[in-house]
Amino acid sequence: MKKIAIIGAGNVGGQAAFFCAQKKLGRVLLIDIKEGLAKGKALDQNQALYLMGINPLITGSEDISSLEGSDVILITCGVARKPGMTREQLLKINLSIVRDISHVVKRLSPQSIVLMMTNPVDILSYACMKFTGFPRERVIGQAGVLDSARFATYISQRLDLSSADIDAVVLGGHGDTMVPVPEFTTVSGIPLPQMVSSEDLDGLVKRTRNGGAEIISYLKDSSAYYAPSLSAVLMIEAVLKNEKRLFPCSVYVDGEYGMKGVFIGLPVVLSEKGVERVICIDLPEERRDDLKRSFDFYRGEIEKIQSEVEA
């Protein structure tokens, strides 16, 4: 049975563990340095699994070394951005956390595939790849699956149509520079721009870029976790089951669209290899420009941490 290690037993990590167990993807190890947190959630979840007719599959631990021999590792730990905290402060704290975890992963699970959820996800995916020395196929950032789900949900609400008929595409970085792609977003095969006015389209794009902040504005002291965790679990499932699913994921670019040297969201095929291949679609000029702006932003962010990740 495959081993899935989830580092961080907060809302996202805890829910991801439960989704993995529900889908029977393998043995799930939930790790958190906070005493009792992972063990308590694992016990509660195993009892829920019993009620669902599923054998207990989740183990909680405070010992990071227990991830040894994992097939897939999902990193969700780190601090969330608090009021008054700058982006640079958030990055400094979470970069240190990812550095420590990456060194353990490299030593104890050198053949694993790592999925990154900790923000800023595109930058920390890059850092994790550098710290572990893993090839780009085995370090993947989760962002586009979630952002595309948000885009599809907003479209469904605006059109009053089933979301099952909507295929949404969001590329670029996970943040203000994300690139929703209406031209490749369809409703039962019909391109989105043929379904809504340009004004509505602009509103849907803007709402998608602000999707996480909108949820925080309602929750106040928390951020989204149901959709983020399931987004990661779908990626884990694609890897462990060798599904060869096409997802928008944050991946190290190595020449695609003339870009190189950063992590950014592009369509990728996920399989047992991790990133099996990157798909380059023929984007309209406006979207290519948007993607280039996103790339330029993250290239600048990477330059700020280059000395730390290369040390």
Image (tube, helix red, strand yellow):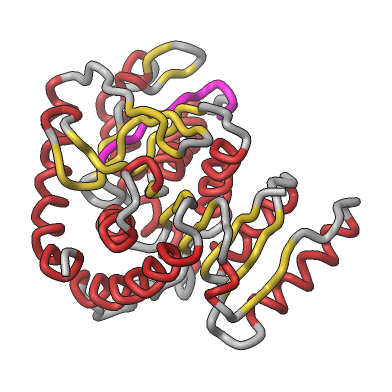
Above/below status of 24 relative to 197: below
Look at the image and give the residue range highlighted in magenta.
163-172
Residue 242 x %, y %: 57, 31
In the image, is residue 88 part of the stretch drawn in magenta? no
The residue closer to the viewer here, 120 or 112, is 112
Q: Residue at x 56, y 85 (%)?
A: 34
Q: Which residue is at 26% across, 43% downward?
A: 252
304 left or right of 220 in image: left
Q: Residue furthest bottom?
A: 35
Point out residue 209 in the picture as x, y percentages from the top left corner: 31, 46
Residue nearest the viewer, comparing 183 with 79? 79
Q: Image quadrant of residue 90?
A: bottom left
Is residue 28 depicted above or below 237 in this figure?
below
Q: How many marks?
A: 0
Residue at 56%, 45% in the rendered image: 236
* Relative side of 106 to 124, left or right: right
State the image quarter where residue 27 is shown. Answer: bottom right
Name the foreground residue: 193 vs 273: 273
Vertical relation: 251 (above or below) 117: above
Q: Residue 67 location in percent, x, y?
A: 56, 66
Q: On the rendered image, what quadrant is the C terminus found in?
A: bottom left
Residue 120 is at least partly visible in this image? no
